[in-house]
Amino acid sequence: MNNAVDNKPVSRMLIALDAMQEKPGALETAVALAAHRQSELMMLFIEDMNLVNLAGLPFASEIDRTSVTERKLDSIQMTRTFRSQTQRLSRQLEQMTRQKNVPYSLRIVRGHYLQEALSAFEVMDVLFMCRTVGKYGKRSTEQKLSSLKSESHYHATSNGVWLMYNDSPAIERAFAVASDIAAATQQNLVVMIHGDDDKVSQVKQQISKYSDRAIAINYFIISPEQQEDTVIELLHSRLCRMLVLPISTEEAEQQNADRFLERLGIPVVVVR
Amino acid sequence: MNKKTQLLQLPAESLYRACNLEDFDFQTTDELADIDLVVGQERAIDALQFGINIKDGGYNIYALGRAGTGKYKTVHQILTRTAADQQPAPDWCYVNNFSAPHKPIALRLPTGFGSKLRDSMEQLVEEISISIPAAFESDEYHSRLDEIEEEIKERHSSALDKLHEEAKELGIMFIKTPTGFAFAPMNDKEEVLSPEDFDKLPEDEKKQTTQKTTKLQRRLKKILDQLPVIRKKAMAKIKALDDEIGRSAINHMLETIKNDFSTLPEVCNYLDEVEKDILKNISSLHSSVEESPMALFGVGQTSRYETFISYSVNLLVDNSKLQSAPIISETLPSHSNLIGRCEYQSQMGTLVTDFTLIKAGALHKANGGYLILDARKILMQPLAWESLKRCLEAGEIRIESLERSLGLISTVSLEPETIPVDFKVILIGDPMLYYLMNYYDPDFQDLFKVAADFDNQMDRNMNNTQQYASMIATLARQKELRPLQKKAVIRLIEHSARLVSDTEKLTTHVRSISDLLCESDHWARQSGHETISEKNVQQAIDKQIYRSNRIQQRILEEIKRGTILISTSGDAVGQVNGLSVMQLGGFSFGQPSRITATMRIGEGEVLDIERETELGGAIHSKGVLILSGYLRSHYVKNNPLSMSASIVFEQSYGGVDGDSASLAELCALLSAIANVPIRQSFAMTGSINQHGQVQPIGGVNEKIEGYFDVCQTLGLTGEQGVLIPESNVKHLMLREDIVQAVRDGQFAIYPVSRVDEALELLTGLEAGERDKEGNFPEHSVNARVEQQLLEFSQIRQNFARENNKEAEQDKDE
C-alpha cells in the first residue's frame, strides 16, 4: 500500500450500517483500512425510518423470508430489533478496532439510509455503505444458487474489488483506497473504465505511478453506450464483492451510489 | 576257550557287511547323475501321487515320518512336477461393495487379469480426477448452469418485480425487513407513511390500504412458497446436468475397461456399479476440497480421496507371474497367516479399515494349487487348526479375526465375501502326531484321508544301493561339496546300514547322510584334498562320536578305576554282565551292567528290585515275569515253586526298561539256584519268552561295542565275548577294530537261540535236555536247578507238615 499516493490523507472514515447487516465482512474491511490509514472510524447505525413507520402501522406484518410465515410487527419489537443489532455491531466493532488499535465512535440516527449516510459523509473522507441483501433479497437467493457452482468456477470468475473510474477529482484517492482494500482482503482489483483502448492507456498512465505491485490490477472496458442495467448485471455476474466509487458533491453521482447499493447488494465505498 | 565254544562264535565276516567294490562303476560322484526324489520311499510317493491326483474332497494328505527323512523335499518335488502340468491359479480381488461397504465383494479373475483390472481402475481414477473437474469447469457446463440459474432468477425475480410494480401502482411500498418482507402504504416521496399520517386518512382509504396490503402479502407468500419448488426443480435440473456432464467425462474410459473385461460378467456388473457411484458422487468429485489441517493427521482426507479410494481394486492374490499351479509353504501357520486378515489404520485414536486393507492368507495364495504345512506348528498356533478345518469343511475361506470368531469383540468391522476353497493341503509331521490326531480328532479322519508314510529304512539291494550312491552324489552337488571317491561313497552306504543297525537295510534319514557329507567335505578341505576320500568319511564319523562320547568315556574311566564294578574275567555265581544302551541326545552307546541274582527258600516270588523301587519300567517287569514263568514251567511243573529270588542291576540308579536283559537275568538266577558259576569274561543280551527261546533285541551293535570298549580298557584276554540273540546276527555292523579283534581271536560274538545254549557258553557245562523219563542228565545245569528247587519244595512241605502237627497239638491241648 502506498501512503505517498494520496495528496490528501484519509483521516475520517464512516461506515453506515442498518438492521439488514448480517455479515461483518464490510466492517472488517473498513476497520482494516482505517488501521492502515491510521484513520478514525465512525459507525453510523441508521434506524430505517421506513421500518419505524411500518412497525407503527396497525396492520403491520411481515412474511418471514425462510419460513414464509406471517408475523405481526409492532414498534416495540422493531425497537428491540434495532437495539440488538446495534449492540451486536457495536461489539464486533469494538473487538475489531481494539485488535487493530483504531479509534472509533458510534452514532445512532433514525432516518432514511442513503440520506443519513450521505449526510454524515459530508464531513468524512470515505464512506462504506453496505446493505447485505439487495432489493428483493436477490443476493441471498443468487448466493444459494451460486453455491451450486463449483468452487473453482467461482474463483475463476470472481474479481473482488472493483473501482468505477470516472473523471472525478477523487479518482486518485479512490484508487488508493481501492488498492488498500484489495491488498488488505487479498483480492484482485478491477478498474472499470467507460471508454476505449486509448482511454485505458490514459488511465493506466495516470494511475501507474500509484499502483502497488503487490496486487493484481485488471482493467475492464465498458463502451460508453452501455446502460447502467447492463453494467450492474455485469458486476453481478462477475461476483463483484465491493465497489469503490469516486464521488463528487453532485447529487447525480450520489444517486449512482444508491442505485449500485440497491441493486448489487454489495458494499459500496464512496470516496470523496 | 574250548573247541566247541570256538565253533559257536561268529566269523569276522558276519560282523560287518561290506559293499562290493565291483558293484560300483564310477570313480567319483562326478560321474553319477542327479536323481529327483529321495530313495526308498515308494510307498510314500505312491500315496502322495494318489492324494494329489484324486479330486474328491477330504483327500488331503498327511506325510508322516521321522524328521530328516526328506518329507518336505519329496512333497515339494512331487508337487512341483504335478503343478507344472496344471494351469496357474486365478487371481482374486476384493472391490468395494457400494451398497454395503462393510461387505467387500470378491472377484475371481483369470490369471493376470487381476493386475490388469487394478491398473485399469487406477488409471481410471487418475483420468477422472482430471477429466471430471475439467468437465465441470468447462465453459459449456457453466453456460448451462448459468442458464438454469438465469431461469430461476427470472422466474423468481420477475414475479417479485411484477409484485413490486403492482404494489407501487397501488401506492404500496414493498419493504425488506431484517427477517423478511412487508408491505406498507407510501407517500409521494416513496417513503412509508408514518402512523400519524395513516391515521389522518379517511376510513375507507385506510380499509382499502389494509386490504391491498393483505392481498399483496398473500401473493408474496405464494411467490415465496414457490421458491423451494423452483429451487428443487433447479436442483433436479442441475443434477441431470451433472449426470450428463459426468457421464460424458467417464463414459469412454469405462467403456474401454468394460470391453477389456467383457467376458467376465461379474467385472462388468462391478463396473456398472462404479459408474453409478461416480455419478452419484459427482459433486464431491469435482468440487475442489481444500486440504484441511486434519488431513495432516490422516483424518478425513479430502472427500475426493475417500471417494476415489472406493474405486480402487485390492489385488488379493496376483498369480500373473506364475507359470503353474501355486505351491505355498507357510512357515508360521497362525490363524491370520492362514486365512488372511483385515488390517486397520490408526486415525486420531480410532481404528479404521476398508476393503483395501484386506490381506491375503496362505489359503488364498494356495487356492488353485497346494498348501504345505507343518503339523506341529499349526497345532501350536492358537485356533489355527480349527480355522483350517473350518475352511476345509465349509469349502470357503472366511476372513475373520480371532477376536471376532471367539466373540470377544463386536465392533463393526469388515465382512469380506467368502472365497471358495480349491486347494489341497499337505500336512507334514511325525507319526506320533498323526496317530494322536487320527484318534482324538474326528474331523481329521474326514479331511486327511491320505497318509503318506515315510519309512526310516529301505532294503539294501543292488538297485537301491546304486540309487543311494546317486543320492549321495546329488546331495553333494546340491550342497556344492567336493565330489566323493568311490570308497567314500561305499563307506557312507555301509554307515547308512549301521545307522539302522541292519546289514540288509539302509537308512532313509537323509539328514544324517547329508550332515556326514558336509563334515566329510570339511575334513577333506582341511586336508587340502580335492575329493572326499574314505578316510575323510571315517574321520567325520569318528569326530561325530568323539564330540558326543564324553559321558561314555567317563563311564569307562570309572570302570577302569573300579568305581563301577564290572568283571571281565573269572567267574561268579549268580552274577552276569548284562548290556544296556544309553541314549544321550543323538548319541547312543552301550555299557555293561552287573546283574546279580540271589535266592532262598520261599513262596515262589521272583523279586524285581528295579520294579520294587520304581526304577524299572513296565517292559522290564514283563521280562522278569516271563522268566519266572519259564522257571516254573521248565523246572517245577508238578511242584510248587518254593523259592524266593531277587534280581537287580547293580549300581544302577537311573531307571531301567526293556526286556533285553531278561536272558541275562534268567542266567544269573539259574546260576544262583544251581550254584554254578558264570564266566565273567562274557557279556550277554537277549530277551526270552516263556519257552526259553531267545528273542532279538535292539542296539546290538552299541552293546557289543560298549562291552568291547570295557574289555579293551581293562585289557583284552582273548577269552572275552558277547552272547547275542541269533536273530540279531543280521543286524551286526560292528566297528572295524572289533572285527579285527575277532579276526585276531581277541574277542568273540556268540549267537544263541535258546537259554540252554547261553547256559552252556556261560558255565562251560552241559545245560541238559530231559530224556524219555523226563530227567535231566546228571550234573547238568538244568539238573542242578531242578534238584535245588525240588529240595526247596520238600523242605517247605516238611516245614508245613511240622507246623500243622504243632498246630494240632496245640489244639488238642
Image (cartoon, rainbow, N blue to C red):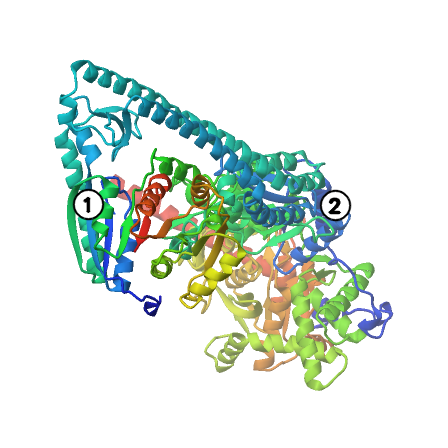
Q: Is residue B295 left or right of residue A50?
A: right
Crowding at dot 1, Cα within 10 Å, few <14 / some 14-19 / many 20+, comes out as many
Question: Given the image, on which type of amino acid does mark 1 rest?
Answer: Phe
Q: In the image shown, does B353 or A241 lie closer to the viewer?
A: A241
Quadrant of the snapshot with the N terminus of chain A: bottom left
Look at the image and tell me in which quarter the C terminus of chain A lies. Answer: bottom left
Instruction: Give the x, y percent position of residue B340.
Output: 53, 47
Nearer the observer, B45 or A158: A158
Question: In this rendering, is residue B783 above or below A252?
Answer: below
* Chain of the residue under label 2: B
Judging by the rendered image, the residue that carries numbered circle 1 is A45
* Secondary structure at numbered mark 1: strand
Q: Can residue B98 be seen?
A: no
Q: Quadrant of residue B296?
A: bottom left
Q: Which residue, as the protein is rendered here, is positioned at the far front?
A: A250
| Residue to which mark 2 is pinned | B87
Is residue B359 visible to the viewer in this orientation of the structure?
A: yes
Q: Position of residue A139 (x, y in %)?
A: 37, 38
